[in-house]
Image: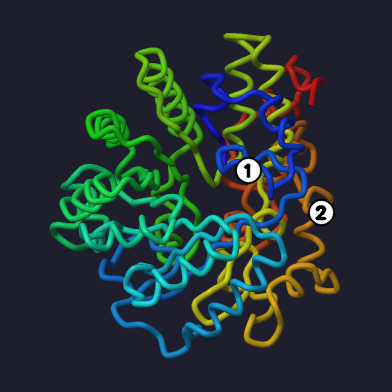
Amino acid sequence: MIGISKLYCGTVEPSDALRYGRHSSQLPSHLLQFSADKKPVVVWNVTRRCNLRCVHCYAHAQEEAGADELTTEQGRALLDDLAAFGVPVVLFSGGEPLARRDLPELAAYAVGKGMRAVISTNGTLITAAVARTLKDIGLSYVGISLDGMQEVNDRFRAVPGAFRAAIDGIRNCQAAGIKVGLRFTINRFNVQEIPGIFDLIEAMDIPRVCFYHLVYAGRGSELIKEDLSPEETRRTLDLIMDRTRRLHDQGKPKEVLTVDNHADGPYLYLRMLREDPTRAKEVLELLKWNEGNNSGRGIGCVSWDGAVHADQFWRHYSFGNVRERPFSEIWMDTSNPFMRQLKEKKKHVKGRCADCCWLDVCAGNFRVRAEAVSGDVWAPDPACYLTDEEIALTHTPVNCEQV
């Protein structure tokens, strides 16, 4: 997760995180990525059920709930363990988390245990009454997925009217006083919609938007050929930075992030080095604290059936099940060779990732994409768009010596 607005527009400085000692239990949510202890943010896919049929769904969501979902009682036991382990945030996801009737009860329980509770939703089920309930239980944030404006979004969601229902959900959250933001997954079918998304967050006064790079998992694995080329990705990042800066300079700042491609960090830094070398030094320090990809360390996932994964895209590999052992025990058990490797992944990446001067900033990017394309989990991430010159694989001078 790369905070474009934080880094490029200077809304966060290293001193902001240092003020809290960089402890995840003390940091406010907008600084959590700079924690030193990297207590995991846990994505809990509470159900596989969903009322939409998104073409890029990593969870292969379906219309009916599975019989293997954790019960409410088992969910409470999971949350007890996560709280005791020091997990700062639980992200309730799915499928569609609001398709699960006890979601408000579980989220309220998480808040009562001292954790921040957020949900990732398609927004279509957020009526005014649901929004008031979510506000009453102390939900920290609602992330609503839109993958374009009406025509494009509804094609992606495979249900006519999904866009309008999501917009209604956003308005209902705003009326209830809940912080709400957008989630957008970038690919060739919808990259042209990004300016419209910026127009939308400005017009509706939506404070946050996350732009997700495509990860080749679930139904998203069928879209590998529709991922952006390196040059298209670079143009897209420049567009996102330009639009973020424009809003900031107009006195309409928004929190803008890119997610799931940690090459964005060095790319942003190199741009800052050209534009504002003094600020670039602070950006580099923050990027080092961010540490790049944190699958298996700073982020984890629990599936609807209790299986524990390195992140929400690793459904083909489980480290154990919370029905049998607590998450905390599974997460810290480095007798599993792969868990141990993920916690020190910079030692195991190969090829240009191993030789890259930005390894401490990126941590080798996404292993799921590498495995999906090459069959080797430690191969270079095929979605890295940095040139050999930019990662110091050639003799062309590049400002990597500070890393």
Q: Quadrant of the C terminus?
A: top right
Answer above or below: position of 14 versus 298: above
Instruction: Provide the residue designation for mark 1.
Output: 32
Mark 1 residue crowding within 10 angstroms, few (<14) / some (14–19) / many (20+)? many
In the picture provided, is 272 more to the left or to the right than 5?
right
Q: Earlier in the sequence, mark 2 or mark 1?
A: 1
x and y percent of residue 101 in the render?
Answer: 34, 77
Question: Disc number at residue 344?
Answer: 2
Amino acid on which disc 1 is placed: Leu
Q: Nearer the viewer, residue 54 or 221?
A: 54
x and y percent of residue 168 in the render?
Answer: 18, 51
x and y percent of residue 375 in the render?
Answer: 64, 63
Residue occupying the far bottom of the picture:
67
Disc 2 is placed on an element classified as loop
Residue 192 appears anywhere in the view: no
Proximity of marks 2 and 1: CB atoms separated by less than 8 Å: no
x and y percent of residue 46 in the render?
Answer: 46, 73
Answer above or below: position of 344 versus 81: above
Residue sitting at x 49%, y 77%: 304
Disc 1 is placed on an element classified as helix
